[in-house]
Image (cartoon, grey):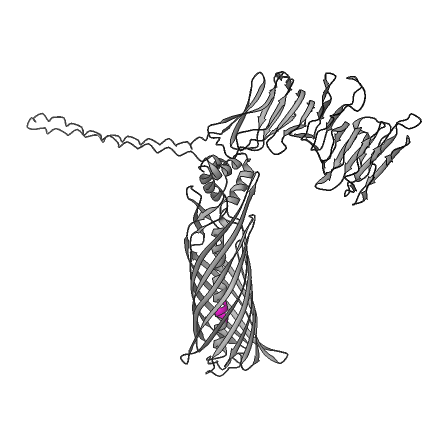
């Protein structure tokens, strides 16, 4: 198959999965019978076009990229003696072009990730990268395609701009006393890999990256010239190696930037290290303009000092951790010396002649006690120097003294290369505020269970032993006072707590089921037992952390209606089984962490309310008090060096509540229905700021705070109780809680059967 048989440009585009196979191979461009060079182009993906008035490497332009088509890998592609081109302009993330390429032509890359994985040893001409990423996995330009002199032989030229060319094989050959390959890296271009190229020029904005995000050595057979503003992206290996460029000729540095992007994860930098980044057999030349450095080492790190040392043939990189000065000790204010109190001279007696009175010896002034010099403040840890919140600062203190070996050192060194903002983000991921914040959500959930019991007791007393005042005609019809009851109530709630205390926010949802049985044990008092199960799910804001808690509930409740006064109380115990997952990920580091933890909570509540009937509405001011004790056991996360040991913690919290309820009876489809609502104010006391002690493996302890309980919360409730028959009630309700940084919503549905 021949592509391009006339002077007019011929295009063949393979896109959107189209397939082509040519048994005898494909020939792109030739010199026709009229001795005219033809022009053929094979495009993989989107269309391309050539400006006929231009002959330079930028004569070809690309349209919109498309999904690639496929040329059968058995179809060899040859460039004839015309002007043939192969262009890649696709959207595929990993296109393997395994066809044999031979002859002198032009290969273009405009978009997509392309690997030339076939035999390219016979390929000569130009490789032009203007976008995407092109990988030459094998050797290039190993065969002379034409000519028998240094000026007529086939050569290869690389031109890289706004894209990446990865050379992992040998490009070029030595023939007729010259090396046949050369490379030019323009602004926005990256030349990477572990192969060999010829004389290379890097313009301002161009980058050399041996290995391409991995450790490697790039060989240059010829000279290297790096312009002012060019870049060298350097990585440091885990075994002490570093990226390196080996130049057979001279290396001229005119003001290049050496960017350190990664560190050896197994080497401590507290005392400094030196790495050779470039060796030039013909010598290292300072080609910078007067007053300008030949090269400058740069890093985004907020914690490292990097520098360059030049010898006759080598460019060495020095890396050391910044020294941290201790916080200045304030100079104590000297204590003033008190003035001595003067002794008055006594008046002499006129007669008789007095004996001379000796002058009294003045009382010596006591020396003031010396003020002890204050102890010098300890120097902050290296990572503490950029932290802003208390949680970040505490965690950074522990990170700053991680062991300088093994996995802790890997974490330490990955932190060292971060800038200040990235280091703070890493600290936010590393400290386990999630483990502290879950207690806030579980303590709040204890009030949901108590609220379910409160609603149950109100219904129980309304339909049971209540001695209704004469004016309270709106109250529900009484059931026989001797009845016992059984009930079941599903419930669910959703909570969002915004971040505070330097901790990220937390979203929580709970669904569960409570059931119980109750009856009367005096004319006024009724009581019962309950049990249930719920599951709480947690999702941390601004953290990749989530988990759940399986909650098992058991408790007692009782209440009495004494005329218009209602008294109620409940006590319950909940067992929590918590599981969590956290992911920590920042530049060069990731860790997946899991944990399991047991906890218990004890909750006791009491409430007094007084019913005031006003027409068909009953008002009920109420006051309540609740106590919650939350006790969580310690836990040990599983994972890598970011895994935490978390201490046990206890919290004692008291809630007081004041509010007003209102209820009234209506008929809904001939069903006697009580509608009710309430507004209230809850205030919390005690341990409102959850905190626990955490540590990394083998490291010191540090304190972490979670999101705090809202001190003041507005409460609201609306609901309806439907008397389906004399023995069955259906209760539907919504509760909301709104406080600083907190929004809480709960929906409940309960069924009561009396027997």
Position of 646 with respect to 135 (left or right) is left
Where residue 594 appears, x then y in whole percent? Answer: 51, 50
Residue 263: quadrant of the picture: top right
Q: Magenta stretch mostly in which secondary structure?
A: helix
Q: Is residue 692 left or right of residue 661?
A: left
Q: Position of residue 577 (x, y in %)?
A: 47, 58
Q: Nearer the viewer, residue 383 or 358?
A: 383
Q: How many marks?
A: 0
Q: Is residue 710 left or right of residue 335?
A: right
Residue 364 falls in image quadrant:
top left
Would you say residue 755 sits in the magenta stretch?
no
Question: Which residues make up the magenta segment?
Answer: 451-455
In the displayed structure, 178 sits above or below 559; it is above
> Residue pushed farthest right?
34
Up-down: is 80 above or below 585?
above
Give percent across and percent down for residue 557.
Answer: 43, 71
The answer to whether residue 226 of the structure is visible from this angle is no
Residue 79, given in percent of the width and then of the height, sits at 82, 30
Q: Nearer the viewer, residue 412 or 276?
A: 276
Residue 89 visible at all? yes
Residue at the extreme front of the image, as rendered: 24
Judge by depth and name the residue closer to the eye, 15 or 395.
15
Residue 671 or 527: which is nearer the viewer? 527
Q: Quadrant of the N terminus?
A: top right
479 relative to 201, above or below = below
């Amino acid at each position: 198959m021949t592509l391009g048989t006339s002077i007019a440009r011929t295009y063949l585009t393979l896109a959107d999965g189209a397939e082509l196979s040519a048994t005898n191979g494909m020939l792109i461009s030739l010199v026709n019978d009229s001795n005219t060079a033809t022009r053929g182009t094979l495009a993989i993906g989107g269309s391309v076009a050539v400006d006929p008035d231009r002959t330079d490497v930028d004569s070809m332009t690309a349209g919109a990229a498309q999904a690639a088509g496929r040329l059968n890998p058995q179809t060899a592609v040859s460039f004839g003696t015309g002007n043939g081109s192969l262009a890649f302009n696709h959207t595929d993330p990993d296109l393997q072009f395994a066809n044999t390429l031979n002859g002198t032509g032009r290969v273009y890359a405009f978009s997509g990730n392309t690997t030339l994985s076939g035999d390219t040893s016979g390929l000569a001409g130009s490789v032009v990268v203007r976008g995407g990423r092109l990988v030459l996995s094998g050797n290039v330009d190993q065969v002379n395609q034409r000519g028998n002199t240094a000026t007529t032989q086939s050569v290869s030229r690389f031109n890289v701009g706004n894209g990446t060319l990865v050379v992992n094989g040998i490009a070029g050959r030595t023939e007729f006393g010259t090396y046949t390959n050369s490379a030019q890296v323009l602004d926005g271009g990256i030349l990477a890999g572990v192969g060999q190229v010829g004389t290379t020029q890097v313009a301002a904005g161009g980058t050399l990256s041996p290995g391409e995000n991995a450790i490697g050595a790039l060989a240059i057979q010829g000279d290297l010239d790096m312009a002012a503003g060019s870049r060298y992206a350097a990585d440091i290996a885990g075994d002490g190696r570093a990226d390196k460029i080996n130049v057979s000729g001279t290396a001229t540095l005119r003001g290049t930037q050496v960017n350190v992007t990664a560190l050896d994860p197994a080497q401590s930098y507290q005392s400094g290290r030196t790495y050779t980044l470039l060796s030039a057999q013909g010598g290292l030349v300072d080609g910078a303009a007067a007053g300008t450095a030949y090269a400058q080492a740069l890093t985004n790190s907020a914690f490292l000092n990097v520098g360059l040392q030049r010898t006759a043939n080598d460019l060495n990189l020095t890396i050391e951790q910044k020294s941290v000065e201790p916080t200045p000790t304030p100079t104590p204010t000297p204590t003033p010396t008190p003035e001595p109190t003067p002794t008055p001279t006594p008046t002499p007696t006129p007669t008789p002649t007095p004996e001379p009175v000796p002058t009294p010896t003045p009382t010596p002034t006591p020396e003031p006690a010396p003020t002890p010099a204050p102890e010098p403040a300890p120097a902050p840890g290296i990572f503490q120097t950029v932290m802003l919140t208390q949680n970040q600062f505490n965690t950074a203190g522990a990170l700053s003294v991680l062991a300088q070996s093994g996995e802790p050192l890997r974490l330490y060194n990955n932190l060292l290369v971060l800038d200040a903002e990235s280091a703070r983000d890493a600290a936010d991921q590393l400290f386990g505020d999630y483990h502290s914040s879950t207690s806030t959500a579980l303590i709040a959930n204890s009030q949901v269970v108590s609220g379910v019991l409160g609603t149950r007791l109100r219904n129980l007393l309304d339909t049971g032993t209540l001695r209704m005042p004469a004016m309270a005609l709106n109250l529900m019809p009484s059931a026989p006072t001797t009845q016992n009851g059984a009930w079941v109530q599903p419930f669910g709630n959703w909570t969002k707590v915004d971040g505070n205390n330097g901790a990220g926010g937390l979203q929580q949802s709970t669904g569960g089921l409570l059931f119980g049985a109750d009856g009367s044990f005096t004319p006024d008092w009724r009581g019962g037992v309950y049990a249930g199960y719920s599951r709480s799910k947690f999702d941390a804001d601004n953290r990749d952390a989530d988990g759940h808690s399986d909650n098992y509930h058991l408790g007692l409740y009782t209440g009495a209606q004494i005329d218009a006064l209602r008294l109620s109380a409940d006590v319950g115990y909940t067992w929590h089984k918590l599981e969590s997952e956290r992911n920590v990920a920042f530049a060069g580091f990731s860790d997946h962490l899991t944990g399991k933890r047991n906890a218990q909570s004890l909750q006791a509540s009491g409430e007094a309310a007084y019913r005031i009937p006003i027409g068909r509405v009953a008002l009920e001011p109420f006051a309540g008090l609740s106590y919650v004790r939350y006790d969580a056991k310690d836990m040990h996360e599983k994972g890598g060096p970011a895994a935490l040991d978390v201490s046990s913690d206890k919290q004692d919290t008291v809630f007081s509540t004041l509010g007003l309820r209102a209820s009234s009876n209506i008929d809904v489809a001939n069903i006697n229905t009580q509608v009710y609502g309430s507004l209230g104010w809850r205030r919390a006391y005690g341990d409102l700021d959850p905190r626990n002690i955490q540590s990394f493996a083998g490291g010191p302890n540090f304190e972490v705070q979670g999101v705090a309980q809202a001190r003041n919360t507005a409460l609201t409730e609306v609901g309806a109780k439907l008397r389906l028959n004399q023995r069955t009630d259906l209760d539907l309700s919504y509760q909301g809680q709104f406080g600083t940084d907190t929004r809480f919503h709960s929906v409940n549905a309960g069924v009561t059967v009396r027997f």
